[in-house]
Amino acid sequence: MKKIPMILTIAILLPAFAFARKKKEQDNGPTLKETSDWLATTLTAYGSFANGSQRWEYNNVVLDNDCKFSLILSITEPQDPTHLWIEEDSLPLGAVDSIDERSDDRSFEIISLHTGQLAAVHRASQFNQKPNFTVDTNQLDLTIGGRPNIRPNEMIPPSPADMAPRIVNALQHAASLCQKTYKPPTQEKQPF
């Protein structure tokens, strides 16, 4: 008979501990996976737009479990099918030390991820399917200028100007999650 109160106590405490742990995780905001999924959907929708005679599109937006953020920007000219610019960018989000947002004179929003003095952004580009250049730099600029397609009976999606701060918040949240595990590459110490 003495075992029944102990079993009941354990049966009550286990779900309470599980609920408290889940609540604590929720208090820290979305998980890296949830943030990754939201960024992929949002950047693909808001990063696809016409810029003069060109069509810009972000594709393959990925934030993996190792906190590597990568995406592909394709720029095409519908009137000239031979014109194709592809830029593949990647960086460890843990290296990001600041993110800012600004409007440009063409009513696009520019979101810049900075890695300070560390050249952690890797960029490879191609023009007409031929390698153009590869560079490591300390800044990644994302251009936001489109809107998701509107389906019948849906609300009009926010403008790029209204969505850009939300994208910045998501990137800052992901960067803060990634900074906990990020280890910068070791650099050789110069003798002089």
Image (tube, grey):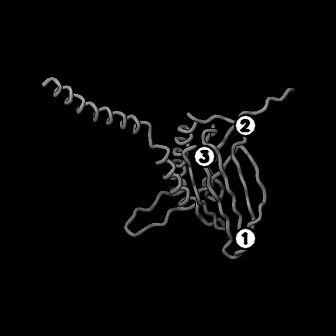
Mark 2 or 1, nearer chain start: 1
Which residue in the structure is indicated by mark 2? 117
Viewed as shown, does residue 79 lie left or right of 62? right
Instruction: State the image quarter where residue 71 is shown.
Output: bottom right
**Residue in front for this viewpoint, 55 or 177:** 177
Mark 1 residue type: His
- Residue 154 position, x and y percent, is 39, 64
Distance between the alpha carbons at the discs numbered 1 and 3: 29 Å
Which residue in the structure is indicated by mark 3? 68
What SS does tag 1 mark?
Answer: strand
Instruction: State the image quarter where residue 138 is shown.
Output: top right
Q: Tell me the tag on residue 180.
A: none
Mark 2 residue type: Gln
Q: Is residue 100 above or below residue 43?
A: above
Q: Is residue 121 above or below residue 97?
A: below
Q: Is residue 105 above or below residue 165?
A: below
What SS does tag 2 mark?
Answer: loop
Q: Residue at x 48, y 57 (%)?
A: 158
Which residue in the structure is indicated by mark 1? 83
Mark 3 residue type: Lys
Q: Is residue 130 above or below residue 31?
A: below
Label 3 crowd bin: few (<14), some (14–19), many (20+), radius 10 Å: some
What SS does tag 3 mark?
Answer: strand
